[in-house]
Amino acid sequence: MREFPFVAVVGQEQLKMSLLLNAIDPRIGGVLIRGDKGSGKSTLARALSDLLPAGAPFIEVPAGATEDRVKGSVDLAQMVADGIVASTGGLLAESNGGVLYVDEVNLLADHIVDLLLDSAASGVNRIERDGVSAVFPAKFVLIGSMNPEEGELRPQLLDRFGLSVQSDGILDPEDRSLALYRRLEFDSDPDSFCAMFDDEKEELKSRLSQARAVSQAHYLGLSAHLSKELFRAITQLCISYGAQGLRADLTMARAAAARAALEGRSEVEVEDIGAVAPLVLSHRARKDPLQDVGYESRTVTELIHKMKRASYEEGDDVPQSKSEGSRSDEGDLPPEATRGPKGPNEPSGSSLTFGHGSAQIMGSVTQSGVKGIYSERIGGGPKGSTPAGYRRGVDGVVDQRGVALDVVGTLTSAVVRRSSGIESTASSFVATQDIVMSEKVAKQGRTILVGLDLSGSIGMNSRTELASAVIESLLLDAYQTRDRVGVIVIAEGTARVLQKPTRSVEMIRAKLSNLRTGGITPLAKGIDLLRMQARECREKGEHPFCILITDGRATGGEFAYQEAAEAARRFNSEDLPSCIVDIEDSQVPIGLAGKIAKNMGSEIITSAELLELIGRSQLRDALFI
């Protein structure tokens, strides 16, 4: 199947450059693409593999990928068939020499993202588990994409992506019509369409091949020579933007050298640094350097020129750029920096033989007297967990939730026992003493739905501020709890979804600040909408929790309150966990929110109690425990 050609994609110049730079030097650390769906992210990612050497794989990491599938583990097929403990390298090894693409990388578990970034930086995949030690080559171009509306990556993970680029849709009508026409041409006749771009594609492949060859030969592993003055400019630039550690400096040096090589130059120029600096610093900058140093320019290139001129004024002796073969700069570098990249030739995999024999695993387990072994399915799925699976007790082995048969550990134990000559009365491959159980409970957050009553005309600002405080408190530790928050508003005579569940505080805060308030209070519609959204989450395997911020007043007709009470009873019939925050501020309270809470089967707290919990950082514990 033909892929849409890389060179035929209209626009997205920064994204194209970011991908090509990583193709030249994968040690740049990959590309994080932020943007909406349909902006060509996956098209360019797939097309990039076609520009790499022949046979370069394109591997896509599924959203529900497990650690074993990504990193690799014991080769069960070979273990069962031959009684040999051997390893498989997983997706990381399969992507060696090609492209590893992760769509919605911000929805992956953090430890999986860690694995991807570690291998992308080191170029190897090391497996140390289940009695197996193995090393697989894993040199690939890492591409991750994400929609910020679904939540951000943790700062520790964000910093480890080499480059970050914003990918937006095409807004220019002429470019957009050209992109549309090309897509239709490709869909109609892929072979003919691709043939029109073959010459341009081959020319770009040749440039990439030459640039990669230079990178492998350079004594610093760079794709072009970088003078001492530009080394200093890079470090000054990263310091001025508050980039922590050396990762930004290293990435900028590699990326600038790769850009020079892509342009066919052996020397890095200041324009190369200016071109890659936004890609390196956009997700790492901690401050605006222009506020500190008083520069009038707001372009990175002019900032570099100003720093260079400042160094001249201070009397620094800035040497001229040296040719690639010159080593006159080496005297100022540490000895290890002048040596070429060296290291042991690590094996592409290893295996340990502990004997031979065939096995019938499940039959052997049954013959060993272990009944009702189960596997509890928790986690997985693109945006939530799958429902818990069948759960039965395991006689004589375990009888508690969240514990399941460790198949790999059990097989390894059996192979080791049989190869060591330990006597066993069992005739099957797996004996009772080989059984290994392990906890299989995955970290799983909640989906929190906040219903906000903004009808009426009194206290609107305080209500939005209260909602913002609730949301920020709940999302403060969302990276650890994996929680997401969605918002429903009741205002202007209707109820609507303001924001689908997300981990982005900024996204919700921005939408709350632009709310229009007032009008009648269709509380019944709000409660029904909250119930339907919660039911939708539950059907996806998520665990919803509803918070309704209201004073309980319902207007819009003679029977508005009775309708709200009926909606509350419908909510109660769904058995949904919930809480009502009573924001009644009357001097003589009438307690309508309390009556609604009783009908909903909800807990109720006052706004004062809520603020106290937020102040003590105990809101989540109070709601869910």
Image (tube, rainbow, N blue to C red):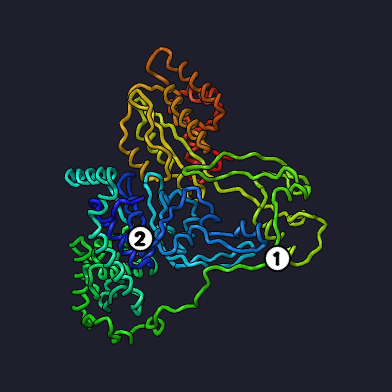
Q: In the image, is 252 to the left or to the right of 175?
A: right
Which residue is located at x 23 percent, y 43 percent? 180
Which residue is located at x 70 percent, y 57 percent? 358
Which residue is located at x 37 percent, y 44 percent? 149
Q: In the image, is 49 to the left or to the right of 579?
A: left
Which residue is located at x 47 percent, y 24 percent? 589
Q: Which residue is mark 2?
A: 284
Residue 129 x/y as whole percent: 61, 62
Q: Is residue 454 above or below residue 340?
A: above
Residue closest to the eye, 293 or 268: 268
Quadrant the C terminus occupies: top right
Distance, label 2 to label 1, CA atoms, is 52 Å
- Can residue 159 be seen? no
Residue closest to the eye, 13 or 349: 349
Residue 242 x/y as whole percent: 34, 64
The three-letter amino acid code for the residue at tag 2 is Arg
**Of the image marks 2 and 1, the number of the one nearer the N terminus:** 2
Residue 512 x/y as whole percent: 35, 37
- Can residue 341 be seen? yes
Residue closest to the eye, 78 or 564: 78
Q: Which residue is mark 1?
A: 355
